[in-house]
Amino acid sequence: MATRRRSGTTAVYLEVGKSKVFACAVDWPGWCRSGKTEEDALDALAAYASRYAVVAKRASIPFPATAVSSFDIVERVPGNATTDFGAPGVPPELDVVKVTPAMAKRQAALVAAAWALFDDVAAKAPAELRKGPRGGGRDRDKMIDHVVDAEGAYARKIGIKPPKASDDKAEAQLREAILAVLGATSDGTPIGEKGWPSRYAARRIAWHVLDHAWEMQDRSKP
């Protein structure tokens, strides 16, 4: 059941786990951040608006200057172990909605823009990335491999069998297949058994790509 928390310009839903909360912009696939509390997650979402605006610009979609003036909390969903691990993992009810041709074209464009940003960041990043506060974190090539592997798993969630090959050509073909699904109209039901709705798939795929693109950017700095 949708619950309104504050009126505003950007529709957001909250995925609430035991130790972590994700705030995700409903209509902007990939603009999704986390925090220990709802307020922390919303603050993080606002803080990343300027970075997400770069993605929207790549997709040739205007990103409103008022996007962070306030948020409209349209749904809360209970999180799970994936949420507390550090990734959104529960599709909201609001994603079970008819996807029109315009909506499909828009979400596919934003996912494609997220991939383009990741590829650009990876091309400029050093092979060895700066370590985190506790010395952890993947270096560039392992992060790229991780993102590629995850896309294969996500593809299965929308009825696509990923290729057995693992070269650049196979990855390009997989992305094309994913965009074909995300760019198609839908009645909003999950795609396949235990699959994802189209809107959630776009949001989850873009979130993972951008999360690592931004991490790579930050850890490329001295």
Image: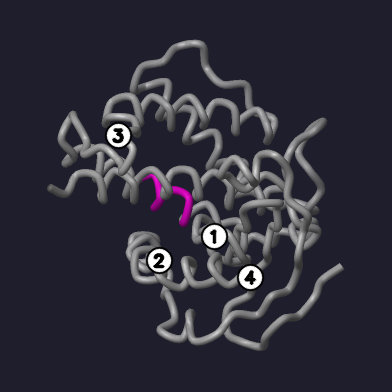
Q: Are marks 1 and 2 in contact (CB under 8 Å)?
A: no
Mark 3–mark 2 CB contact (< 8 Å): no
Image-quadrant location for residue 192? top right
Amino acid type, mark 3: Gly
Q: Secondary structure at mark 4?
A: strand
Provide the residue designation for mark 1. 35
Position of residue 35 measured from the top left corner of the image (x, y, whole percent): 54, 60
**Mark 3 or 1, nearer chain start:** 1
Front disc: 3 or 1: 3
Instruction: Name the image quarter holding the N terminus.
Output: bottom right
Looking at the rendering, the stretch of residues picked out in magenta corresponds to 110-115
Q: Which numbered tag is attached to residue 12?
A: 4
Spatial CA distance of label 1 from label 2 is 13 Å
Q: Which residue position holds label 2?
A: 48
Q: Residue at x 40, y 66 (%)?
A: 48
Q: Amino acid at mark 4?
A: Val
Q: Earlier in the sequence, mark 1 or mark 2?
A: 1
**Mark earlier in primary sequence (3, 2):** 2
Question: Disc number at residue 179?
Answer: none
The mark closer to the camera, 1 or 2, is 1
Give the residue type at disc 1. Gly
Residues under labels 3 and 2: Cα distance? 24 Å
Q: Secondary structure at mark 3?
A: loop
Q: Residue at x 59, y 40 (%)?
A: 85
- Label 3 belongs to which residue? 135
Residue 101 in the image, given as x and y percentages of width and height: 64, 60
CA gap between label 2 and label 4 equals: 14 Å
Residue in the picture at 73% in, 50% down: 79
